[in-house]
């Protein structure tokens, strides 16, 4: 075999291997620029979850069911719903949808928080795994970097 075809085959193989692992290794909390309307509407009630935490199909289901958004009526007008849904799906992750489309039930979330015991989640200052801002001090800015974690006692 000539060197050029062998080199081309190796480069192609490594490119496909790298692409196959890219999504698995991507950090779903990496920051996409937050849409101001998303911050205005969604972050009024909870931290602005990074869109890559859920796949597009999860975001679509959540946006289609806003009158029953985890026990709260989060209804928006049609134009705003469409704008937010389009933005969320455009920046969505590529992982499998977690049960009930809950970020806290995703395999990624469970793996990242596996050292947190059940009693920690029940602390008055935390209350639930979905209260990211309780421990992630920069969560309201979409920054979940571990150096900004402070677990309340």
Image (cartoon, rainbow, N blue to C red):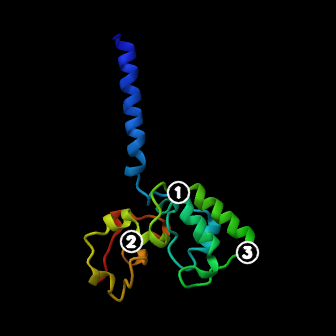
Q: Quadrant of residue 85?
A: bottom right
Relative side of 61 to 100, left or right: right
In what element is the residue under mark 3? loop
Q: Which residue is mark 3?
A: 77
| As drawn, 106 above or below 43 | above
Neighbour tally class for label 1: few under 14, some 14-19, many 20 plus, Cα within 10 Å: few
Give the image location of residue 117, x and y in percent: 26, 78
In what element is the residue under mark 1? loop
Q: Which residue reaches farthest bottom?
A: 124
The C terminus lies in quadrant:
bottom left
Neighbour tally class for label 3: few under 14, some 14-19, many 20 plus, Cα within 10 Å: few
Q: Which residue is mark 2?
A: 136
Q: Residue 60 has which mark?
A: none
Q: Quadrant of residue 60?
A: bottom right
Estimate the spatial distance between the alpha carbons at disc 2 and disc 1, rounded to whole Å. Answer: 17 Å
In what element is the residue under mark 2? loop
Give the image location of residue 82, x and y in percent: 70, 65
**First in sequence: mark 1 vs mark 3:** 1
Please say if the residues under marks 1 and 3 sit with CB atoms less than 8 Å apart.
no
Q: Which residue is mark 1?
A: 32
| As drawn, 68 above or below 82 | below
Q: At 33% from the left edge and 86% from the top edge, which residue is drawn?
A: 122
Relative side of 38 to 131, left or right: right
| In this rendering, the label closer to the viewer, 3 or 2 | 3
Estimate the spatial distance between the alpha carbons at disc 3 and disc 2, rounded to whole Å. Answer: 31 Å
Estimate the spatial distance between the alpha carbons at disc 1 and disc 3, rounded to whole Å. Answer: 24 Å
| In this rendering, the label closer to the viewer, 1 or 3 | 3
């Amino acid at each position: 075999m000539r060197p050029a075809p062998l080199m081309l085959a190796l480069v192609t193989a490594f490119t496909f291997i790298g692409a196959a692992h890219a999504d698995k290794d991507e950090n779903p909390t990496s920051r996409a620029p937050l849409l101001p309307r998303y911050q205005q509407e969604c972050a009024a009630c909870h931290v602005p979850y990074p869109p890559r935490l859920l796949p597009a199909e999860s975001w679509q289901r959540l946006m289609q069911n806003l009158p029953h958004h985890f026990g709260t009526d989060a209804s928006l007008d049609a134009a705003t719903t469409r704008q937010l849904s389009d933005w969320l799906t455009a920046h969505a992750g590529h992982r499998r949808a977690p049960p009930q489309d809950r970020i806290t039930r995703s395999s990624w979330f469970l793996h990242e928080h596996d050292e947190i015991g059940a009693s920690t989640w029940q602390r008055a200052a935390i209350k639930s795994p979905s209260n990211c801002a309780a421990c992630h001090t920069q969560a309201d800015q979409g920054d979940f970097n571990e150096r900004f974690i402070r677990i309340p006692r």
